Image (cartoon, grey):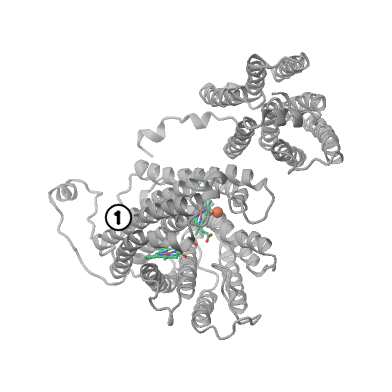
Amino acid sequence: MTDQATDRPSALDQLPGELMMWVLIVSELLVFGAGLAAFLAVRITDPAGFAEAQGHLHRAGAGVNTIVLVTSGWLAALAVQAAEAGRPGRLRALVAGAIALGAVFLVLKGAEYADLAHAGITFETHAFFTFSYLLTGFHAAHVMAGMILLAVVAVPASPRAVETGAAFWHMVDLVWVLLFPVVYLL
Amino acid sequence: MKYQSQKIALAYFLVAMALFAVQVTMGLVLGWIYVDGNFLTEVLPFNVARMLHTNSLIVWLLLGFFGAAYYLIPEETEREIHSSKLAYLQLAIFVLGTAGVVVTYFFNLFEGNFLLGREGREFLEQPRWVKAGIVVAALIFLYNVSMTVLAGKKTAITNILLLGLWGLALLFLFAFVNPSNLALDKMYWWYVVHLWVEGTWELVMASILAFLMLKLTGVDREVVEKWLYVIAALALFSGILGTGHHYYWIGTPGYWQWIGSIFSSLEVVPFFAMMSFAFVMVWKGRRDHPNKAALLWSLGCATLAFFGAGVWGFLHTLHGVNYYSHGTQITAAHGHLAFYGAYVCLNLAIISYAMPHLKGRDPYNQVLNMASFWLMSGGVVFMTFTLTFAGTVQTHLQRVNGEAFMDVQDQLWVFYAMRFGSGVAVVLGALLFIYAILVPRREVVTPGPLEKGRLDHDADHVAAE
Amino acid sequence: MTVTRAWLALLLLSAASTGLAASGAHGAVFVVLVLSLAGAKAHVILSRYLGLSAAPPIRAGFDLALGVVLVLFAVLAIAA
Ligand code: HEM
Ligand code: HEM
Ligand SMILES: [Fe+2]
């Protein structure tokens, strides 16, 4: 290739990790971003109803879940370093920790869902719940997928694979730190 | 043509083009019935003509895809197709099935029969025996191409193409799921219709475009492959849950309104990426390929697909808008430009590219071919505009003011008359295309001063014929 | 900043969000503060966990997009 357009190193080449994972991360951010914006837009039509509905969520549990997830993300980031340092034992231990914290997240989340279900609250109860179930449900599904992915990449334990798995996991973190304040706090 | 078995594509393309002619002619009949409601009511009722129009569209597009696969897979894998015999058998089954469908729709001898009667779900009206035939033919096809790919070189283009083709064949199985509950019926119906055009077919489109770009522009394979994977990932990410944009009003739970709106809005992205891909490749490429017509169709495909699927799709995909526009002429406007841009142009591009190789001669009649592009595309774009106006007026009168359906239709007559006019252009364009492809000729035009200068001074530049 | 320092920063930011929420504050200032904290957390995750600190132009792009989205959120939240 001789023309200059291809010789100039593009910004894309600086991207750390797997290009396809970044495509996924950006896509997910767009989806959740649009969902949260729609949530806030619909909230304008009924602020009191939304505030009342929000009271049924486990605010404290969700706050704890933030800590759980960012800590899990930290373990995953350390796991990438362990993989790069060629220490598979340490890597697997760290990944196991990250997955375990993912499970803790799901348990806390499950407790909230159980309480809501117990109170007879469904998707249809109020627009607030349509959104909160959709957004947190989608997110929880990603937590599950991320746990599986982490377990899978820990098997070959190559730096590239672990980095890709961890990137997905960080995306799950990232979505949560944006979702949590909008759905639970505002 | 480097491989003998690529010749199979010729037969597929010929049948495809014949059905293409039938399809657009049927469109014209439909267009006239819209102008004069009593036209042919006894011989060829609207619903029958409509079935023939849409079914022949799908069948010829599929035949084109199969032909494209048989053409490009040997080149990509550097192998002959596993079995030419099976490929022709597959084509024969399709032709038989198509004949069966025409007879069934036309004479309707077996209404209600489990095996022989038509099924009456748009696009999937074929009697069950034909559906079974399609499955058998698809299995033969998948076996044939998969064996070829497994034995040969695997490239990103064959990977994505096979993924798309396997996906589309497997999704067709939902055509057999036909619950009597209408909401469920529709739910499964979209698994075929939507997940075809906004999922698996998109993969086929991206891989065929990638092949064309590789050949026509001479850009490095690595660059093409990176784009291809990104486009495929974007298409699946947005398209699968994008199905929700058909679940707004059919009795499915309310949350689909948000899932559908959000994910289907993202469906614009892969179409935009495909358009960018095509133009960036041409801009970066240094090859001055003699087959200008194939390049024109490829660029036209990417561009019109972006407008038809991306822009006209987005226009009515948010549930707040769709609440008013659902099932109006806006839908028809989008359906025409999207199908034309994405899949008709794609097939005509690969046919324009492959035919000279298949017939072992230079790309003749380039100018006629390119003229047919402008005529046909101009016709479809104009038709899209008339239908969009018709749909906007219809939405207002019918959905906002609450006037009765037929009263509104009466007021839309002028738009339908113009749509018929644009349809004539489309049909003429289609016939011109087929002529340009099939009938050999030399030099249609003599190069003007500008072109002459390039021919004299630029060693790479090849004359269009 | 190592990933461990990033983690500590995230814990601090989360504590700040929790404290803010527990204070019972509300209104426009509360909205802006909570969303700013969220933006800061997202920035840390992108830079350190996802490694964008190695690619400043890309990180700047993400920050810009994030900023726009958070402003939109703030406007919508305050409008309610
Ligand atoms: C390559 C060109 C064409 C393509 C890809 C195409 C595609 C389609 C599709 C997908 C539908 C179903 C639309 C829906 O369900 O909303 C349809 C219906 C129809 N098409 Fe075409 N068509 C083409 C050419 C034409 C032409 C030339 C005409 C003539 C004017 C025409 C007139 C119609 C009419 C009247 C209908 C029925 C709409 C209805 O039921 O209200 N089409 N076509
Ligand atoms: C090449 C790709 C595409 C093709 C061939 C296509 C074709 C069609 C056709 C034929 C219909 C009418 C179906 C029926 O009979 O009811 C339809 C409906 C629809 N399409 Fe597409 N489409 C494509 C891509 C898209 C995209 C990307 C979007 C969104 C951004 C979109 C949004 C819609 C919507 C919302 C409807 C339902 C319209 C209604 O409610 O009546 N389409 N499409
Ligand atoms: Fe669709």
Taking depth in this image into account, of A61 and A149 the one nearest to the observer is A61
* Residue A34 image position (x, y, % from top left): 59, 35
What is the x, y in percent for residue B231?
52, 46
The amino acid marked with disc number 1 is Lys
Give the residue pinned by disc 1: B292
Q: Quadrant of residue A173?
A: top right
Along the line of sight, the residue nearer the viewer: A147 or A136: A136
Which residue is drawn at the image coordinates 52% and 25% (left, top)? C61
**Residue at position x 67%, y 16% from top?**
C30
* A85 relative to B18, above or below: above
> Taking B42 as reference, is A39 left or right?
right
Q: Which sits in the foreground, A11 or A117?
A: A117
Quadrant for ligand 1 reads bottom left
Task: Please indicate whether residue A160 sits to the left or right of residue B85 in the image.
Answer: right
In the picture, the quarter occupied by the N terminus of chain B is bottom left
For residue B291, say whether it is visible.
Answer: no
Q: Secondary structure at mark 1?
A: helix
Quadrant where the C terminus of chain B lies?
bottom left
In the image, taking residue B421 as reference, residue A73 lies left or right, namely right
